[in-house]
Image (cartoon, rainbow, N blue to C red):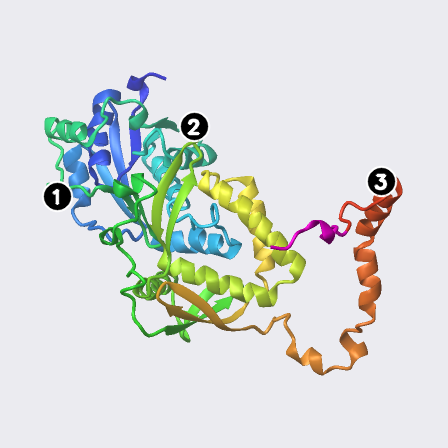
Amino acid sequence: MSKAQVKKVVLAYSGGLDTSVIVPWLKNNYGCEVVCVCANLGQEEELDGLEEKAIASGASKCYIEDLREEFITDYIFPAARAGVVYERKYLLGTSIARPLIAKRQVEIAAMENADAVSHGATGKGNDQVRFELTYQALNPKLRVIAPWREWNIRSRQDALDYAVEHNVPVASAEKSIYSRDRNIMHISHEGGVLEDPWLEPEEVMFQLSNSPEKAPDKAEYVEIEFQTGYPKKINGTAMGPISLLTTLNKLGGKHGIGRIDIVENRLVGMKSHGVYETPGVTILMEAHQALEQLTLDRDTLHYKQVIALRYADLAYNGRWFSPLRDALDAFVNVTQEQNTGLVRLKLYKGNISIVGRKSPFSLYREDYATFGEEDVYNQQDAEGFIKLYGLPLKVQAMVDIEGFGKGRYQEPDYSKFKRD
């Protein structure tokens, strides 16, 4: 397909320098109409005037979409219920936001009868994959235009020059040395001193959280009530998704909760060093997992930990809209049917302590200790259980002794060890 065949493109638009210059670039290189979509995911940036800026940059229309509640309900909460963590630390605040933005682009493309979609992700990061796999999953007929893989703009100065040449309004404020992505779940930091993983991040870099040193000297207690794995109340007060997460963000940020520093493996093959602040969801996941310790049996809890790793990989790699995630969600939903109860946590200088939990479906039953021995547990039963459980080890040892004269784990000869 030649560039001239594109009639209308829907662009994921933030109002920043890159996506602002993409508007005239698309028009100049594809001769197409450009419709912008700006998703409000709780980034706390000023959205007033963004539509006018998009129009001034050459767009025919700009949709300003408040997707915060959908983001929390359909993306953050499912990820938290599944317990997903990428490479032991990252809670996927950026990874799970991109599919939602791309989904809305596809929906608006249908409304606008557009034949293409576009994004401002670079050609060496993960976001290009997340956007484009969503496009493929939801409407593979749409053409995808990724300017960073096509144009000759290679620096901020190149972009500024292009903006001036095409009368694109740009902010005069100095650009931060850090590359950041913020939404109601988290903020990420890359670049600057973080390019050297040996250097300690500067305190001025952090946006959402106090340092543990500057956090209050007095601990604060918070209670979170869950129904089927969904958080519903904080300290006894029922809250909607936005209010609930905003409250937890403030609490976590106040006490220095949710900072992580990670050298992660990008899907495209390179490593990157980043720092994330995820105060509210860090608290939420700690509470959720504490409740599961009461309500899930051993085999289900252990298997859920296994699928959480797979879930995290597919979310990080942009496969949010996939049959596998549907199947994993079905499993998670079954595990959460009785995950209802209350968890009390203590927040103090970057730490979260679980100090109480209870559930009407708790499998931890203190009252069983008062029953007669035969009613619940007969200690003599353990002997047969242990013999059967250890039978493979016993057979292996017997084979080793018969064939080699000794077992592979035979007790060492301590006489060979000298004392100092």
- Choose mark 2 or mark 1, whichever is in front: 1
Residue furthest toward the top? 2
Q: Which residue is mark 2?
A: 141
1 and 199: which one is in front?
A: 199
Q: Are marks 2 and 3 in contact (CB under 8 Å)?
A: no
Q: Secondary structure at mark 3?
A: helix
Q: Amino acid at mark 3?
A: Phe
207 and 243: which one is in front?
A: 207
The numbered mark, 2 or 3, whose residue comes first in the sequence reads: 2
201 and 228: which one is in front?
A: 201
- Choose mark 2 or mark 3, whichever is in front: 3
Give residue 19's position: percent from left, percent from top. Answer: 24, 35
Q: Which residue is mark 3?
A: 404
Residue 252 in which image quadrant: bottom left
Q: Secondary structure at mark 2?
A: loop
The numbered mark, 2 or 1, whose residue comes first in the sequence reads: 2
Q: Which residue is mark 1?
A: 173
Q: Are marks 2 and 1 in contact (CB under 8 Å)?
A: no
| Residue drawn at x 27%, y 65% as measured from the top left | 214
| Residue drawn at x 79%, y 55% as measured from the top left | 390
The region drawn magenta spans 411-420
Q: Secondary structure at mark 1?
A: loop
Q: Amino acid at mark 2?
A: Lys
Residue 112 in which image quadrant: top left
In the drawing, does residue 284 fall left or right of residue 305? left
Give residue 342's position: percent from left, percent from top. Answer: 50, 72
Above-or-below relation of 122 to 237: above
Magenta segment, principal secondary structure?
loop
Which class describes the residues within 10 Å of circle 2: few (<14), some (14-19), or many (20+)?
few
- Quadrant containing the N terminus in the rendered view: top left
Which class describes the residues within 10 Å of circle 1: few (<14), some (14-19), or many (20+)?
few
The numbered mark, 1 or 3, whose residue comes first in the sequence reads: 1
